Each structure stands twice: as structure tokens, then as C-alpha cells.
Amino acid sequence: MSEKKTLIVSSSQDTTAPFVEKNLNQQGYSVVWYKTDLVAKGHVPASLHISPTNGATLIYNGKTIDLHSIGAAWQRKPTVEIQFDDKARGLTLTKEIRALQDGIWDILPK
């Protein structure tokens, strides 16, 4: 099958994404499900690295993903609101997570 990966960007609470992921896996495709809410809450680490020699890589949940290896992307429910007692902290973290996600989308090869 394809050497390219499919990127799903959605919340871990998304009830449709698991079926899509399973179906693609059964067809032999490699799927990366970027779970926005788990990253936002600090349960799953994610970082974006940009290098003039190596290009852009996403380190997500301990796995390094070359963004040039993404052949298709599905952005289903990427927006996440982080709730904290300290509203300023929640708004700041929400803004930072959105910036990371937007950066990933902007860097994906067209």
C-alpha cells in the first residue's frame, strides 16, 4: 500500500475518527490521529521542529513524524477549549495549542 501517512486532527472524544482510522488501517494505510484535547491538557506531548536541512517534523506522543510523509490530512474537530479555574491560563494555553496546530497545517506539503 501507500508509504504516505494519513493525519487525522481531532479530539479524542470524536466518535467518528476511530472508525475512519480503523478502516484506513485495514486497507493498509498508516494513520496518525493527533488528539488535540490530549495535547492541550498535557496528557500527550507534541512539538513541531523546523530545520533547513531536515524539513519539518512533528514529535507526537514519542513518535517523530516527517511532515513530508503525510499524504492526506483530515481536520475534523480540531478546536479545543481548555478550562481552568484561572481563565487567563486557559485562554493562553488554548491560543498556544491553536498556534501549534495552525503551524502544522501551514507546513504540510500541498
Image (spheres, helix red, strand yellow):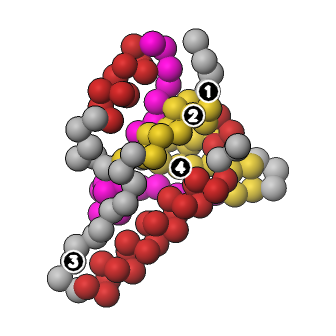
The x, y position of residue 24, in whole percent, is 43, 21
Q: Which residue is mark 4?
A: 59
Label 4 amino acid? Ile
Residue 74: in magenta span? no
Label 3 amino acid? Phe
Instruction: Measure the alpha-carbon separation of dots 1 and 2.
Output: 8 Å
Q: Secondary structure at mark 3?
A: loop
- What number is the disc on residue 60? none
Considering only order in the chain, which callout, 4 or 2, is on the residue closer to the N terminus?
4
Please tell me whether mark 3 or mark 2 is closer to you in this view: 2
In which image quadrant can residue 21 be found?
top left
Q: Is residue 61 left or right of residue 14?
A: right
The residue segment tinted magenta is: 27-49
Q: Which residue is mark 2?
A: 72
Instruction: Measure the alpha-carbon separation of dots 2 and 4.
Output: 18 Å
Quadrant where the C terminus is found in the figure: top right
- What number is the disc on residue 4? 1
| Residue at 70% in and 44% down | 109
Instruction: Measure the alpha-carbon separation of dots 3 and 2.
Output: 34 Å
Q: Residues within 10 Å of mark 2 (few under 14, many from 20)?
A: some
Q: In the rendered view, would you say 17 is above or below 35?
A: above
| Residue at 42% in and 19% down | 25
Considering only order in the chain, which callout, 2 or 3, is on the residue closer to the N terminus?
2
| Cβ atoms at labels 1 and 2 below 8 Å apart | yes
Please tell me whether mark 2 or mark 4 is closer to you in this view: 2
| Cβ atoms at labels 1 and 4 below 8 Å apart | no
